[in-house]
Each structure stands twice: as C-alpha cells, then as structure tokens.
Image (tube, helix red, strand yellow):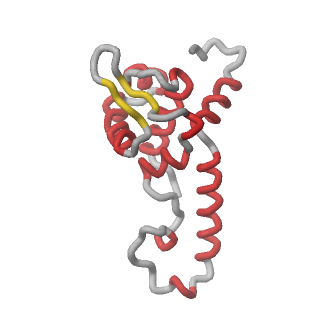
Amino acid sequence: MKISTKGRYGLEALADMAIYGERDYINLKSISERQGISDKYLEQLFIHLKRSGLIDSLRGAQGGYRLSRDADKISVKDVLNSLEGPLALVDCIVETKEECCNQFDCCVTRVLWQKIMEELNFVTKAISLADIAMLFKESQKGSNEYYV
C-alpha cells in the first residue's frame, strides 16, 4: 500500500494547523507557503476534509480553516481515511467491499493481510495530530525555523 500525495499533503496540512494555530482560523496561503503545497491543491483536499468533519471554515478577511476539534481528538487514521479511504493492502479485506475473490475462504495469505491491516489501523488510530505537533516542536528546539 502506498499513501498518495492526497493523503500525505492532507496530513501535512492538518499537522501544520495543529502546530501553528490548533483552534485558530488559518488561511490556506500560509499553510501552502510553510509546507510547499499548492494552495489550489489544498483547496481540493480541504473540500474532503470539511465534508468529513475534520475542519471548519469561516469566510471573510479574518476567515480561513481550523480543526473542528482538538488536535488530540483527530487521529492520523481519521485524516487518511477521509482522503484515501480504508487502509488496506489488498481489496479482499476491506469490510465495505461487496465482493471478494473466489479464493477468499481458502486463501492462505488472507490472515496475514488482515493482521497487517489491523496493526496499521491500530498505529494510525493511536497517533493524533497533537502527537505529530509535539514531535515536530521537540525536533525544532534550538532551531529558528519554528515560530508560534
């Protein structure tokens, strides 16, 4: 499984929001400049993130986007599922999949794929945007690149 740029950039943008103004409205241009992501691309991502309830928006001069809840209540899994869909290495173990392959009941590797998916879901659910923000802030101690 490979996380697409949609998932990576979306996670970077929300982590940026957790670092630079968790509950404040932030304009896309500032996120775009800090993270080196096109603001047009961020607009597309933020449509999905807003629809998923992970962010709120406010129009106007003082507007922008903010996290819809505290950063410690938004997991990496929430963000990736919003942008990528269910995290799975193979289609046959996705619970929402209507059909499975004709070897599903006798597949010798299905248990392995399920175990990996469970672990991946466990890890991504256990790490919040607040955790990412804290790790970033700790890595920037003594550096002039981190400002809040």
Q: Quadrant of residue 5?
A: top left
Q: Quadrant of the C terminus?
A: top right
Tally of numbered discs:
0
Q: Quadrant of residue 56?
A: top left
Is residue 144 rendered to the left or right of residue 2?
right
- Which one is in front, 127 or 111? 127
- Which one is in front, 90 or 114? 114
How far across and how far down the image is residue 58, in percent? 32, 25
Against 31, is 44 above or below? below
Residue visible at 60% across and 33% down?
Answer: 130
Query: What is the residue that sits farthest to the top in this orientation?
Result: 144
How far across and how far down the image is residue 94, in percent? 48, 68
How far across and how far down the image is residue 53, in percent? 40, 42
- Which one is in front, 25 or 6? 25
Is residue 136 rendered to the left or right of residue 59?
right
Residue visible at 51% across and 58% down?
Answer: 87
Query: What is the residue that sits farthest to the left in this orientation?
Result: 60
Is residue 39 rendered to the left or right of residue 84?
left
Residue visible at 36% across and 23% down?
Answer: 64
Against 139, is 96 above or below? below
Is residue 32 rendered to the left or right of residue 73?
left
Residue visible at 48% across and 44% down?
Answer: 79
How far across and how far down the image is residue 128, in percent? 60, 40
